[in-house]
Image (tube, helix red, strand yellow):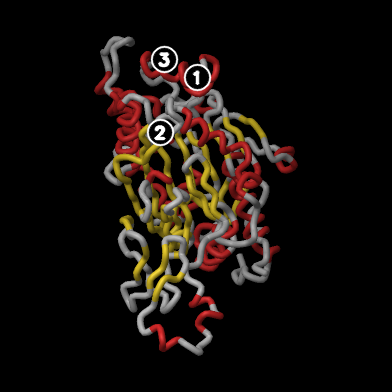
Amino acid sequence: MSSNYRDRPEAIRALVQEDRVHRDLYLSDELFALEQERLFARTWLYAGHASQVPNTGDYWALELAGRPVMMVRQADGAVRVFYNRCAHKGSRLVTDESGNAGKFFRCPYHAWTYKLDGAPLAIPLKTGYEGTRLKECESGRGLVELKNTAVYRDFVFVRLSDRGPGFEDYFGEVLRAIDNMVERSPEGRLTVGGGVLRNIIHCNWKMYLENINDTVHPMSTHESATQAADALWQGRAPDEPKPMAMEQILPFGSGYDFFDKMGGRVFANGHSVLGINFSIHSNYAQLPDYEAAMREAHGAERAIEILQRSPQNSVLFPSLSVKGSPQAIRVIRPLAANRTLIEAWSFRAAGAPDLLFERAMTYNRLVFSPMSVVAHDDVHLFESMQQGLKAEGNEWVSLHRNFDPAELSQDTISTNGTNELLMRNQFRAWARYMAEAST
């Protein structure tokens, strides 16, 4: 397949066919650079959660699509996002991941200072700038704020480019996944807890995102883990309470029919929900006191609706995967064409029992930790695929399972849980954003 994709939108579109994709999507450094400029800049990326900056002056620093940014809590309680760059020479203002700036930011290089809202505050040797053009140019205006920032139920999203869809238009119905997660708190409030599990995988980010919607691999990829769990639990009475780890790992071996019947749904812009009927999270032990608190907070009918909805994964393309139960998210941070950072975060639901938080923490450790008995299977195969795709003779990756030409003309489709439509939907969104010119 030809390179030099920047000025050839037709070549980019040719990489994503109706039922397969070209290996360049995973291997090409040129395409990865274009993704930073087009896909990741023009879509809405998850930046963080407002609970990570609870007090005035608190900041949370990270990289989004290769750009250094920071969430900052303002004196009026708002959360705003700025580029983490001094307007003078470009030094990052903060190098710690989190902290409190006090009443202002101070650059460690030349001590230029900025208010929490990004406005310039003071510079040393001020008289040396009199009569110059400093105030007329970007360097004199202070920090650059990312104006396209949306805070949805304390989840903070950013669109880096001035081009691209509005927040509600972009996400649409898939935002209900966040609603369900937040409303599992009787008080309607979540806080990040327990730190973060980070795993750098030597594979393209799209491999990981595909796998989130892949229900066929658990029976083979995770066979050893589920067989070991089965062996430990053999001979127990069916109604014997399971330890939390058993409760969470045994369903991975449920079989093809289970995963197929759980169902899935796709939406415009690459978003999806896997497990619209049920999932491996649907049969956790009941908590009567918590359920009573939920009925009191939301009403009986709404409480049942919230608690019975436990999708396997909800993907807010391209950077976020949400699990309402357990209350956990994964954030996909692409680093290079062959390197991806995965973050797994747990949430505490205000007014809910600690057991819910323990479920989130246990699940993340069990399934997403770098030392997980589940994750190491996936990581091995992702890195194997990244190398295997360099082989000659077949430049394409198959996405044929359950393909139906009718899907090409629809945005929202409900389907069976093993249909590769959920993956095809992601790549079609990818192609649409990537084929748009930069100007």
Report crowding for label 2: few under 14, some 14 to 19, many 20 or more residues within 10 A (C-alpha): many
Q: Is residue 423 left or right of residue 295?
A: right
The residue depicted at 43 percent of the width and 78 percent of the height is 88
The residue depicted at 47 percent of the width and 50 percent of the height is 78
Quadrant for the N terminus in the image:
bottom right
The residue depicted at 52 percent of the width and 80 percent of the height is 135
| First-in-chain label (2 vs 1) | 1
Quarter of image, res 423: top right
The local secondary structure at tag 2 comes to: loop
> Dots 3 and 1: beta carbons under 8 Å?
no
Could you tell me residue 180's position as x and y percent?
50, 30
Amino acid at circle 2 = Gln
Structural distance between the alpha carbons of marks 2 and 1: 16 Å
Q: Nearer the viewer, mark 3 or mark 2?
A: 3
Quarter of image, res 330: top left
The local secondary structure at tag 3 comes to: helix
Determine which residue is flagged by label 2: 327
Q: Nearer the viewer, mark 2 or mark 1?
A: 1
| First-in-chain label (3 vs 2) | 3
Determine which residue is flagged by label 1: 303
Determine which residue is flagged by label 3: 292
Could you tell me residue 403's position as x and y percent?
66, 38
Amino acid at circle 3 = Ala
Amino acid at circle 1 = Ala
Structural distance between the alpha carbons of marks 3 and 2: 19 Å
| First-in-chain label (3 vs 1) | 3
Say above or below: 264 vs 32: above
The residue depicted at 32 percent of the width and 10 percent of the height is 239
Quarter of image, res 339: bottom left
Could you tell me residue 179's position as x and y percent?
52, 33
